[in-house]
């Protein structure tokens, strides 16, 4: 794909909400100007203050007529994240990628941002790809979930089924490491070893050095992601 074609997809079809809005927003530009930049690039006919105000209203910012002139530091973390979402919505994307959108926000604001995303999905009819480490958020928000390890999808399934019956050894280990309110274990269960560094992946299955059921051939053959049941995909020939 040419850079021009890619540029049409980025923002035009797919928009991205980065984590840490405080670090993603330009600290020396008013938030209204930052949203307008996105409009100028993707919807130049709509690059007006009125449209910026409408977008701020859409993401639930009160008194947007005055907030448009704020700098990012004059807003709370939750409001900054709403501005990031407004910027992403400016291009009317079909897919919104939200990368850990609630990182660094307190629990109440986290819930508000997630509710906003859920509401926008319904109202605007767009798909959301949510990147998160939080299984509670997965349970709450996702219809389908792709579990990734060392840059590869190792399991793909409808959320409820995956959480009820994980199939890949990594997904199982991940679920076992979630602390439980009842239980009383002295130490949390952890997955031994470390995630390999990018460019330094082990041969064969990337999870092999940490997998409790690894076999010799696991380090020789690269497992494929295969559909093992209707709608359920697993990258492990020994998933049973
Ligand atoms: S392929 Fe082998 S090492 Fe990889 S997850 Fe399956 S059993 Fe474990």
Image (spheres, rainbow, N blue to C red):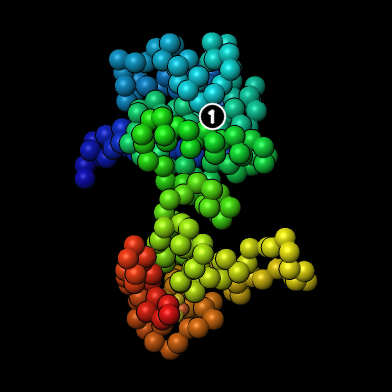
Q: Is residue 136 above or below residue 189?
A: above
Q: Is residue 33 above or below residue 148?
A: above
Q: Measured from the top left, where is residue 123 in percent x and y?
A: 41, 30
Q: What residue sits 41% from the left and 58% below the top?
A: 158
Q: What residue sits 34% from the left and 72% below the top?
A: 228
Who is closer to the viewer here, 17 or 136?
Answer: 136
Q: Measured from the top left, where is residue 84 in percent x and y?
A: 50, 31
Note whether ligand 1 is within 8 Å of mark 1.
no
Decide if residue 152 is in sight here: no
Who is closer to the viewer here, 36 or 238?
Answer: 238
- Image quarter for ligand 1 equals bottom left
Who is closer to the viewer here, 3 or 77?
Answer: 77
Tag 1 residue:
82
Q: What residue sits 35% from the left and 75% below the top?
A: 223
Which image quadrant is residue 22 in? top right
- How would you rate the neighbour count of disc 1 (Cα within 10 Å): few for under 14, some for 14-19, many for 20 or more? many
Decide if residue 238 is in sight here: yes
Q: Say what secondary structure mark 1 lies in.
A: helix
Q: In which quarter of the image is the C terminus?
A: bottom left
């Amino acid at each position: 794909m040419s850079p021009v074609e890619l540029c049409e997809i980025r923002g035009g079809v797919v928009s991205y909400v980065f984590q840490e809005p405080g670090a993603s927003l330009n600290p020396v530009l008013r938030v209204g100007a930052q949203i307008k930049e996105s409009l100028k690039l993707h919807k130049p006919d709509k690059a007006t203050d009125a449209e910026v105000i409408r977008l701020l209203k859409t993401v639930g910012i009160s008194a947007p007529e005055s907030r448009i002139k704020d700098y990012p530091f004059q807003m709370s973390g939750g409001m900054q994240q709403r501005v990031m979402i407004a910027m992403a919505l400016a291009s009317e994307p079909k897919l919104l990628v939200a990368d850990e959108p609630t990182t660094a926000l307190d629990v109440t604001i986290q819930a508000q941002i997630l509710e906003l995303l859920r509401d926008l999905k319904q109202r605007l009819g767009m798909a959301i790809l949510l990147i998160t480490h939080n299984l509670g958020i997965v349970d709450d928000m996702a219809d389908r979930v792709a579990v990734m390890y060392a840059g590869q999808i190792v399991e793909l399934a409808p959320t409820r089924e995956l959480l009820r019956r994980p199939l890949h050894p990594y997904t199982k280990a991940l679920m076992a490491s979630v602390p439980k309110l009842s239980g009383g274990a002295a130490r949390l269960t952890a997955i031994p070893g470390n995630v390999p560094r990018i460019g330094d992946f082990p041969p064969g299955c990337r999870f092999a050095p940490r997998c409790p059921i690894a076999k010799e051939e696991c380090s020789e053959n690269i497992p494929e992601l295969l559909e093992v049941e209707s709608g359920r995909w697993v990258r492990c020939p020994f998933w049973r």
